[in-house]
């Protein structure tokens, strides 16, 4: 790489770097400062201890953990499966149509998708009301009971976000050398054997990348329970997720130190789980 190319590289990454500093690194450092201080005085881990002792904290942790678990499992299983199926479609126009249909829901903003699902989940107006009634749900309040919310949020998130990952996985499948696929067919491997022994191992880094990005999004659960709480007159509690609890600490209790402590806990957990995907998937290792 010559000096000219290096300069152009710096120009291209400069915008992202400035945004990362302004809206990523600096707010994180400020949150760390707030989490260990109160009214400007250093208090050690007192803010964390106070947050952990809050009766709302552990239920919020459990809610987010269940949602992230369901969300990641559904992504890893169904996204990879659907991407392999679409990749195996030999009719060109049909494959293009399938990729387009998968991608369309991702073009809808998060809040809009929740509003759409309010109608889908309401048995009185839902196009699948027959199914909801058959499952024993007579109203929206029954559907969005707290025990059902991890599944409800997983369905909403999968509908909105899985399509773009399917398109990405499809592109990764196209990068598998044709010679490798032909060799597998010559050796007598069927579609299932080819997917299990050839395609899935070569998708490992992309699956790890999807896991890291989905963890970052999943742990930030806020919009979905907030809108459902407003639509159901707080049948969904205002402190359902950790982000909601942090919001209440900051803007209801005027306790920005406690809010920052929750944010730091979320950051540490997300980074730790992401590290598992990175190292297990060998994300940064060159082939």
Image (spheres, helix red, strand yellow):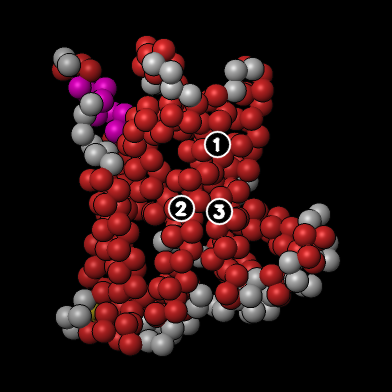
The crowding category of the residue bearing disc 1, from other C-alpha atoms within 10 Å (few below 14, some 14 to 19, many at least 20), is: many
Q: Is residue 92 magenta?
A: no
Residue 232 x/y as whole percent? 69, 75
10 Å neighbourhood of mark 2: few (<14), some, or many (≥20)? some
52 to 224, vertically: above or below: below
* Image coordinates for residue 107, horizontal then vertical, percent: 60, 41
What percent of the width, then of the height, locates residue 181? 41, 17
Q: Quadrant of the N terminus?
A: top left
Task: Estimate the spatial distance between the alpha carbons at disc 3 and disc 2, rounded to whole Å.
Answer: 12 Å
- Name the one closer to the observer, 246 or 113: 113
Point out the stretch of residues depicted in magenta.
Answer: 6-13
Q: Secondary structure at mark 3?
A: helix
Say whether disc 2 or disc 1 marks the residue closer to the N-terminus: 2
Q: Which numbered circle lies on residue 73?
A: 2
Q: CA distance from mark 2 to mark 1?
A: 14 Å
* Element carrying mark 2: helix
Q: Nearer the viewer, mark 3 or mark 2?
A: 2
Judge left or right: residue 204 versus residue 228: left
**Frontmost residue, 112 versus 268:** 268
**In the visual, does 105 lie left or right of 54?**
right
Q: Of marks 1 and 3, which one's residue comes earlier in the chain?
A: 1
Is there a contact, CB below 8 Å, between mark 1 and mark 3?
no
Image point 28% across, 28% down: which residue?
11
- The residue that mark 3 highlights is 157
* For marks 3 and 2 on the same chain, the one whose residue lies earlier in the sequence: 2
Residue 122 percent coordinates (x, y)? 76, 65
Per the image, the residue denoted by label 1 is 82
Residue 163, label in figure: none
Where disc 1 sits, the SS reads helix
């Amino acid at each position: 790489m010559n000096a000219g190319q290096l300069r152009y590289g710096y120009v291209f990454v400069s915008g992202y770097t400035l945004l990362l500093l302004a809206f990523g690194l600096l707010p994180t450092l400020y949150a760390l400062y707030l989490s260990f201080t109160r009214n400007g005085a250093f208090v050690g881990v007192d803010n964390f201890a106070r947050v952990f002792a809050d009766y709302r904290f552990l239920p919020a942790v459990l809610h987010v953990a269940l949602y992230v678990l369901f969300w990641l499992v559904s992504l890893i299983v169904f996204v990879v499966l659907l991407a392999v199926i679409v990749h195996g479609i030999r009719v060109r126009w049909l494959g293009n149509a399938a990729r387009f249909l998968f991608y369309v829901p991702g073009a809808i903003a998060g809040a809009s998708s929740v509003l759409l699902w309010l109608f889908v989940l309401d048995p009185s107006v839902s196009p699948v009301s027959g199914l909801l009634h058959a499952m024993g749900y007579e109203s929206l309040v029954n559907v969005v009971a707290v025990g059902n919310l991890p599944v409800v949020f997983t369905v909403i998130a999968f509908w909105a976000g899985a399509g773009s990952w399917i398109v990405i996985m499809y592109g990764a499948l196209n990068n598998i050398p044709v010679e490798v696929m032909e060799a597998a067919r010559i050796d007598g491997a069927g579609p299932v054997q080819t997917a299990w022994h050839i395609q899935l191992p070569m998708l490992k880094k992309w699956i790890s990348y999807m896991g890291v990005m989905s963890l970052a999004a999943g742990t930030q659960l806020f919009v979905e329970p907030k809108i459902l709480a407003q639509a159901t007159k707080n049948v969904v509690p205002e402190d359902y997720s950790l982000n909601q609890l942090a919001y209440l600490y900051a803007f209801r209790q005027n306790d920005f130190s406690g809010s920052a402590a929750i944010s730091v806990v979320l950051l540490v957990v997300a980074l730790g789980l992401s590290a598992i995907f990175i190292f297990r998937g060998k994300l940064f290792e060159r082939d």
